[in-house]
Image: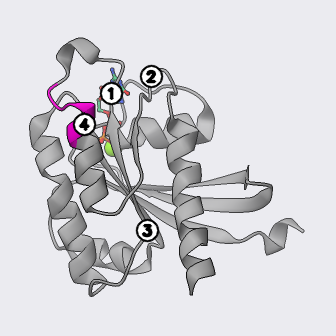
Amino acid sequence: SASKTRVYKIVILGEGGVGKSALVIQFVSHRFTDYHDPTIEDAYTQQARIDGEPAKLDILDTAGQLEFTTMREQYMRHGEGFIICYSITDRRSFDEVLAHKNLIDRVRCHENIPIIVTGNKCDLEQKRKVSTEEGMHLAEQLGAPFFETSAVLRQCVDDVFHGIVREIRKKEHEE
Ligand code: GDP
Ligand code: MG
């Protein structure tokens, strides 16, 4: 029954403006939001069937700076899988991916936490500052699957959210 559906606690991290909220809202509501208050930290739930198995995704859309606040520590501690997002049009957001990974490692004492790296805004090819190869290489270093997404075109959006559930399941089967 629905009440028995496994809940997956997912956190999306990344610099402000990379499209975290747009990705989450596109995944949950199948629409593109041009503006979402950058200071709002909100949780969304979405039922999905992933590889034939039901899942309830509990997604925290984070906001604000890369700081070690009490609230941040709370969700960093409880997340089962993390999506680290940058924008392919913003080199600085790409450079911040490692800082987010380090924060996860710090809170979780280097426990092997499922991560996915996503380069968003891939519809803006003419403004690209980070190559696909660089993204792939960084993700490989972190042992994470990699996708280039577009919240506008809904490109690879399901792959990212389903992918993080797959990573969590993979880890569970290994344990
Ligand atoms: P957040 O701060 O990471 O949550 O970023 P938002 O979701 O608020 O998005 C920041 C800005 O980037 C907004 O103007 C969005 O409309 C825009 N945006 C988000 N995703 C995409 C995308 O995939 N392509 C394009 N072209 N713009 C996007
Ligand atoms: Mg946001």
The residue at the point 20 percent across, 72 percent down is 103
Residues at marks 3 and 1 touching, judged by CB atoms closer than 8 Å: no
Disc ID at residue 152: 2
Residue for badge 4: 133
The residue at the point 58 percent across, 41 percent down is 158
Categorize mark 4 by other alpha carbons within 10 Å: few (<14), some (14-19), many (20+).
Answer: few
Q: Earlier in the sequence, mark 2 or mark 1?
A: 1
The amino acid type, in three-letter code, at marker 3 is Pro
* Badge 4 element: helix
**2 or 3: mark nearer the eye:** 3
Queried on whether the Cβ of the residue with tag 2 lies below 8 angstroms from ligand 1, the answer reads yes
The amino acid type, in three-letter code, at marker 2 is Val
Please state the horizontal and vertical placement of residue 132, each as a whole percent of the image. Answer: 27, 33
For the magenta stretch, what is the residue range?
Answer: 129-134
The amino acid type, in three-letter code, at marker 4 is Glu
Q: Is residue 78 above or below residue 136?
A: below
Residue for badge 1: 121
Disc ID at residue 94: none
